Image (cartoon, rainbow, N blue to C red):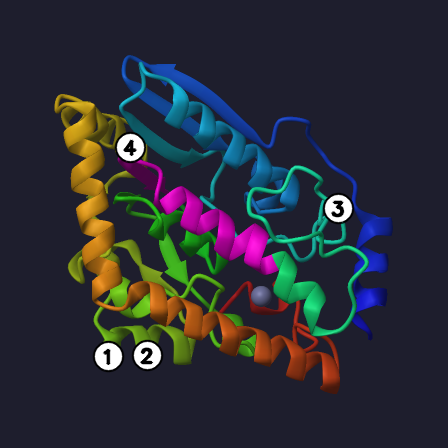
Amino acid sequence: MTPASDTAAAAAAAVYETDAPVLYAQQDAIAIVSLNRPKFGNAQNAQMLYALDGALRRAASDDSVKVIVLRAEGRHFSSGHDIGTPGSDFATSWPDRRTLWYDHVGTVGAETHYVREQESYLGLCRRWRELPKPMIAAVQGACIAGGLMLAWICDLIVASEDAFFSDPVLKMGVPGVEYFAHAFEMHPRIAREFLYLGERMSAQRAYEIGMVNRLVPLAELHGAAIALAEKAAQSPRFALALAKQIFNQIEDLQGKRAAIDAAFSAHHLAHAHNQLTGDWLGGVRARDVKKT
Ligand code: ZN
C-alpha cells in the first residue's frame, strides 16, 4: 500500500463520535483537562490532539490557573494513537498547525508520516512539555504507546492500581513511540525489557521503579491528583515555572532532547522500510497488539 492510498483510505473513513474530544474544567487554581473519547479508550486522533492543545493553551494563558491535571474519561487513560477507530483522521489537513511544519496532506513517500509526526506527535509533545506550569497526569487502565507520550510529558504521574503501561510498537516494526523518553523514564535495563518484550508494566512496578509518583485505588485517583495539584499550587507561579524549566534543562543536558531526535529519525526509517516492504505499520493494527 502506498502512503497516498493509506491516507486516502483513512480520509474516507474518518467519522467523529463527539464534538468534544477534550473537556476543560477549573477547580480553584487547578485546570482539569480530560481526554474524552472513552468509547475508544481515548485513542488520540488529530481532533483530540488539537483539542488538547487548545485546552492546554487556555490553561497556560489563564492567570488564575497554576497547575494542570491531565486525566481521562472512561476506563482507560489512552490506548495510544488512533490507528483504527472510525475517527482515525491522520489524512485530515489541519490548517491551524502548532509548529511551522507544512501540511502533510498532499505529500508522498516517507515525507507524509515524517511531516505529520513532526507536527502532531513530536512537535505537540515538546510544546506541552515546555508549558510553564506543572502538569500532573492521572492514569487509570491502559496507557499504551502514544498514551505514554501524554503521561511522560507531565511533571508528575499518579496511577490507579488497575493502570498498566506498555509500548508494543516493536511488533509494528518501529522501535518505540515517537517521543522516545523510555530510557529517561526508567532505568535503561528496564526500558530495554519494556520495549523488547512489549509487555504490560503494572502500576505497582511503575511505582517501584520511580516512573509513577503515587499509586492509589481507582476510586481515589482523581482526589490524589487534585491533592498534589493543590499542594503544588501553593507556591508562586513564577517559581514553579522556573523549577520546571530547570528540570527540563537538566534532562536535556543529560541528552533527552538529542536522544529523542535520534530515535525519531530511526522511527521514520522504520516507517519508510515498512512502506517499502508492505505498509507503514508492518501490517499490524491496534487489535493485533491489544492483548500483549
Ligand atoms: Zn510513527
Apparent side of residue 205 relative to residue 34 in the rendered image (left or right): left
Circle 2 crowding by C-alpha within 10 Å: few under 14, some 14–19, many from 20: some
Q: Is residue 235 visible?
A: yes
Query: What is the spatial separation of the Cα atoms under label 2 and label 3, in whole angstroms?
Result: 36 Å
- Give the label on residue 192, or none: 2
Apparent side of residue 148 relative to residue 120 in the rendered image (left or right): left
Please state the extent of the stretch shown in magenta in the rendering.
117-139
Q: Secondary structure at mark 4?
A: loop
Residue 41 percent across, percent down from the top left = 55, 45
Residue 129, magenta (yes or no): yes
Looking at the rendered structure, the kind of residue marked 3 is Ser
Q: Nearer the viewer, mark 4 or mark 1?
A: 4
Q: In the rendered view of the protein, which quadrant contains the N terminus?
A: bottom right
Residue 276, relative to residue 163: is it above or below?
Answer: below
Task: State the residue at coordinates (54%, 76%).
Answer: 174
- Determine whether label 4 and label 1 are within 8 Å by CB: no
Residue 37, magenta (yes or no): no
Q: Is residue 142 visible?
A: no
Label 4 belongs to which residue?
133
Label 3 belongs to which residue?
93
Q: Nearer the viewer, mark 2 or mark 3?
A: 3
Query: What is the spatial separation of the Cα atoms under label 1 and label 2, in whole angstroms?
Result: 5 Å
Looking at the rendered structure, the kind of residue marked 4 is Lys
- Determine whether label 1 and label 2 are within 8 Å by CB: yes
Looking at the rendered structure, the kind of residue marked 2 is Arg
Q: Secondary structure at mark 3?
A: loop
